[in-house]
Amino acid sequence: MSKPLGADRTATAEASTVDDVLASVRARGGRATSSRRALLEALFNTDGHLTAEELAAAVQARAPGVYISTIYRNLDDLQRLGVVVHSHLGHGPATYQLASSAHAHFICDNCGATVEAPDELFQGLARTAKAKLGFSIDPRHFAMLGHCSVCA
Ligand SMILES: [Zn+2]
Ligand SMILES: [Zn+2]
Ligand SMILES: [Zn+2]
C-alpha cells in the first residue's frame, strides 16, 4: 500500500458509474475483471472512506469467492491505473476513494468530525507553493487537522 501515486494520473471527473471506471481501466491498459468490478461496486456503495480491511470485507460480502490477496492486489493496481486513490484521515489507516470523487478533508482533532474541504480552498496555497517553491501540493492525500466550529 505504500507505492507513491502518479500525481497526474487521476481518472476523469465524468466517471460516474462502475462501467465508466472500468472503461478508464481498459483505456489505461488494465483489465476489467469481475473482482475489480466487485471492488469498484463496493467503493461506489459507500461514502468513500473505507480502509483496505473494510473494503475487503465489503467485497467479500458481495462476492464471497474473491480472495483477500486478490482484493489487496486490485487495490494497488487500480491506484496505479489512477482510478482509485487513498487518503489519510487523521491517525488511523489509509482510506480509499474513487479518483473521480476524491476530495480533501478537515478533521477535528477534538471530536473527530470530518469536514469535506472543497478544492477552491487550496487554490491560493497551491499557487503560492508552486510559485515560491516549485512544489505542486496534493491537499487530498492527508487531511488537515484542526478544530470544528463546535470545538473551536
Ligand atoms: Zn498515502
Ligand atoms: Zn470538533
Ligand atoms: Zn470525504
Image (cartoon, rainbow, N blue to C red):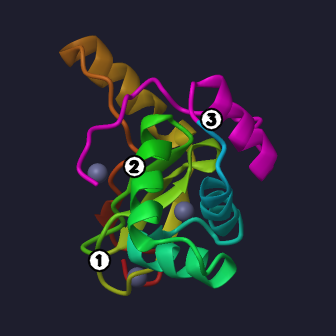
Q: Which residue is mark 3?
A: 25
The residue that label 1 is drawn on is 109
Rounded to the nearest angstrom, the CA distance separating label 2 from label 3 is 13 Å
**Which stretch did the figure color magenta?**
1-30
* Residue displayed at 33% across by 32% down: 137
Above or below 19: residue 53 = below
- Residue holding disc 2: 76
| Mark 1 vs 3: CB contact within 8 A | no
Q: Mark 1 vs ligand 2: CB under 8 Å? A: yes
Instruction: Between label 1 and label 3, give the one nearer the viewer.
Output: 3
Instruction: Point out residue 60 in the picture as x, y percentages from the top left corner.
Output: 57, 79
Which badge, 1 or 3, comes first in the chain's sequence?
3
Identify the image quadrant of the C terminus: bottom left
Q: Are the two marked residues, 1 and 2, in contact with CB atoms closer than 8 angstroms? A: no
Q: What amino acid does circle 2 point to?
A: Asp
Q: Position of residue 114 (x, y in %)?
A: 48, 72
Q: Earlier in the sequence, mark 2 or mark 3?
A: 3
Residue 12 shows up from this direction: no
Q: Residues within 10 Å of mark 1 (few under 14, many from 20)?
A: some
Q: Residue furthest front?
A: 65
Q: Which quadrant of the view contains residue 146?
A: bottom left
